[in-house]
Amino acid sequence: MDSTELPPGEGDRFALITEDNYSGYLWIASILGLIYSLLVIVVRLHIKWNLFGADDVTAAVATVLQLGQVVPLFLAMKHGLGKSNDLLSAQQLEDAGKATFAAQIFLILALAAAKGSVAALMLRLFTRDIKATRRSWILCNTTLALTVAWGIGAIVAVSVSCSTSNFINISSQCGDRVLRWRIIAAFDIFLEVLLVTLPVLFIWPIQMKGYIKLQVIVAFGFRLPVIGFAIAHLHYVSSYANSNNVSKDIIPALVYQQFELFWSLLAATIPTLKAFMRSFNSGFGMEIDLDGYGSAYGSNGTYPLESLQNATSSNGAVVSRPGVRARTRERDDVTFGSRSATGSTRDRRITPLSDIMREGSQELIIQKEVQWTVRHDDAGTQRR
């Protein structure tokens, strides 16, 4: 048998996985991650059709950046990334190194955009232009600022004193590569912890059913695996940083980066799913119509509370303003009918979103309490 002849069937494979070639693992992870991420963003845009906000735009940008990250990886693998350095020429190592470096930059940008999408979503859900939510507004905007700073700092940390053409060349590796990625990963994990814990802090003081709180916590807690993927990536950075075969040994680290990016994009969309958003209907004192996707925002992407207007009937009973439509409980919405009272009473009203989406407010988390006193004379009493 000719020594150069491949075993039957191997010559037709798209990407071989052998002792000297690990690129197949990266091909699988990057292609599947891209496909699933595109499906996720399509589902998100469909769910939020005509209800788009800054969080949706940022999620779409993150998906585009993921595509920008995958394309250089494909080029790098075409030039030999994943194969043993001994099998590659100097030109192949240079071309693969440049493409891999570009992929790292796009990956950091995509991760930052995915985190920013969650922070922007929290800004829409948990904040309003009133004193009661000022702390939430500050925390959400601080998280956004930290995310931007992390993205810029991570790119600087990866780039400084590193030659793009020698990125995977054993003769000229970046100094202190492990230390750089430890710092990047530490802030990455810190931001993920913020994105998971802030919703808990915001929702815990609110008076609502426990299972609704649990839905919100679980939806945002879906990001926790991102921390695990970041730690796994850091572990494999330590493995290839001092390796004499960087082109092959870097593959596990790149694979875990694909996992981290995909899960980050997926977790950014989970809280926007219809079933989750419906939980705000009864929990936050304002009904959110998710069955009809009309335009829900004014010119500035917000909608206001409608004023509470009551009328007094001839018998002195307080009745709700006409035109407020009742909602059925079949969709788990909370409704309050008309009420008459003597003395002092307290009540809450929820106005359907379709009646109030006109202008001037943030969104979603609004709780309004109204207190009034009703007095009337007996039916037979006449003034003399």
Image (cartoon, helix red, strand yellow):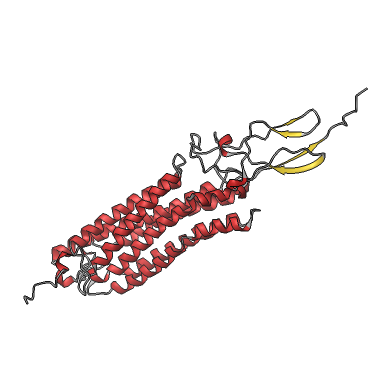
Image point (58%, 37%), residue name:
304
Camera-side residue: 3 or 22?
A: 3
Which quadrant of the structure image shows residue 319? top right
Location of residue 16 with respect to 263 vertically, above or below:
below
Camera-side residue: 68 or 341?
A: 341
- Does residue 253 appear in this view? yes
- Does residue 145 appear in this view? no
Image location (x, y in percent) of residue 145: 46, 52
Q: Quadrant of the C terminus?
A: top right
Image location (x, y in percent) of residue 220: 50, 57
Image location (x, y in percent) of residue 316: 80, 31
Location of residue 170 with respect to 371 vertically, above or below:
below
Location of residue 138 with respect to 314 vertically, above or below:
below
Camera-side residue: 276 or 364?
A: 276
Number of marks: 0
Residue 174 placement, left or right of 127: left
The residue sitting at the right extreme is 384
